[in-house]
Image (cartoon, helix red, strand yellow):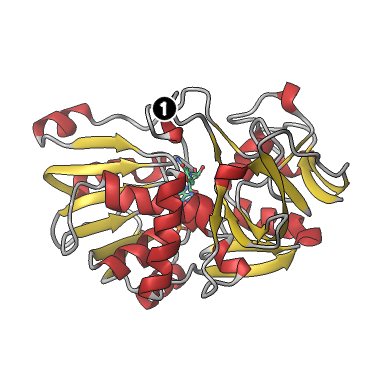
Amino acid sequence: MFAVTAARIDADNPLSGLELGERPEPVPPDGWVAVTVKATALNHHDVWSLRGVGISADRLPIVLGCDAAGTDPEGNEVIVHAVIGDLDAGDGDETLDPRRSLLSERYDGTFAEQVCVPRRNLVAKPAALSFAEAACLPTAYLTAYKMLFEKSGVQPGATLLVQGAGGGVATALILLGRAAGYRVWATSRSEAKRERALELGADQAFPAGARLPERVDAVMETVGHATWAHSVRSVRPGGRIVICGATSGEAPPAELTRIFFNQLTVTGSTMGTRAELARLAGFCEQTGARPVIDRALPLTQARDGFRAMIAGDLFGKIVFTV
Ligand SMILES: NC(=O)c1ccc[n+]([C@@H]2O[C@H](COP(=O)([O-])OP(=O)(O)OC[C@H]3O[C@@H](n4cnc5c(N)ncnc54)[C@H](OP(=O)(O)O)[C@@H]3O)[C@@H](O)[C@H]2O)c1
């Protein structure tokens, strides 16, 4: 079958380890099923893997990709949950299993004609969502869903700041936050992306680092070093910063004085459970919210998608069709 793999790790030139070509058809172990992939979506995680973050060289070659929508062996339309974990080990939450992994970390991922997953990792795809839309949900949209509805600690009507408006998680935060009734403010380095954020439903959009009209109730952080100081200054006393990623660097000055003096809460967030993925699919179906797709390319042109993501030249999700 055709697949896109990480063959080598190169922290400085991630594309040099990307290979496109034939791989053996996977054989599902007991309790697992092979899903025929119709669409899959690119995440920054795939770039991190090529750079050697979160994966070691002894796992290579490995098929990249966390997200997929397709059909199960019985022909049902399904969305693939990307977290491979033990519910008991996580006390009922597979994302808290200390040994949990995402597809493409320990097991082959979704950038292929077929992907094998435990049967419990399949969620019914609502007919109202296309395969391309459904393929955006398992990583970026699920992460945004949990950040908003489980981790933010604030209710609809509150003001949220989304840093780095153009990214996959950031656009998901704007779209889902707006659909749920939050007042969403966004920042971006790019004026064009700020305009797109407003079209998507952001209430206001600001240049990166701009002083805001007032402090917000919670900040949604995916950018890391480049926006951290602004996040700490932009949240009201007692407010919260939810962080799921650090694209621009993971070690900014911690700003400890502001954090204790303003009694801020900083909380990490990673992915979500299978049950949350099913609720997210229902949320999209009920509200009419649909993932923002920057572009859809055939999987055979995956290299172009990686290039765009590394350059930050995107607004929303890059989808690969199979
Ligand atoms: N914990 C989890 O479960 C989880 C799940 C998904 C993603 N993540 C992480 O979250 C991060 C975002 O993922 P993604 O897939 O949404 O990535 P992406 O689509 O590549 O988004 C990157 C965003 O970062 C901003 N950005 C990048 N470099 C910047 C810089 N130097 N200064 C300011 N802004 C910068 C860009 O904003 P503008 O161009 O608009 O300014 C862009 O919106 C990644 O680090 C990823 O690994 C974690």
The 10 Å Cα crowd at callout 1, few under 14, some 14 to 19, many 20 or more, is some
Q: Closer to the camera, 294 or 98?
A: 98
- The C terminus: image quadrant: bottom right
Reply above or below: 152 against 252: below
In the rendered view, would you say 310 is above or below 10?
below
x and y percentages locating residue 193 in the rendered image? 45, 68
Q: Nearer the viewer, residue 111 or 70?
A: 70
Can you give x and y, in whole percent of width and height, for residue 252 in the image?
A: 37, 32
What residue sits 66% from the left and 69% below the top? 296
Q: Is residue 176 above or below residue 198?
A: above
Q: Secondary structure at mark 1?
A: loop
Task: Please tell me how many numbered marks the rendered image carries.
Answer: 1
Tell me if 75 is positioned left or right of 316 in this view.
right
Q: Amino acid at mark 1?
A: Gly
Q: Is residue 264 visible?
A: yes
Name the residue at 43% across, 73% down. 196
Image spot of residue 6 (x, y percent): 75, 38
Residue 297 location in percent, x, y?
72, 67
Is 57 rendered above or below residue 306? above
Q: Which residue appears at 81% of the width and 49% of the height?
A: 3
- Residue 205 visible to the viewer: no
Q: Quadrant of residue 135?
A: bottom right
Distance from mark 1 CB to nearest ligand 1 atom below 8 Å: no
**Residue 73 quadrant:** bottom right
The quadrant in which residue 239 appears is top left
159 relative to 162 in the view: left or right: left
**Depth order, front residue of 130/219:** 130
Q: Residue at x 18, y 48 (%)?
A: 235
Reading the image, the residue beneath label 1 is 90
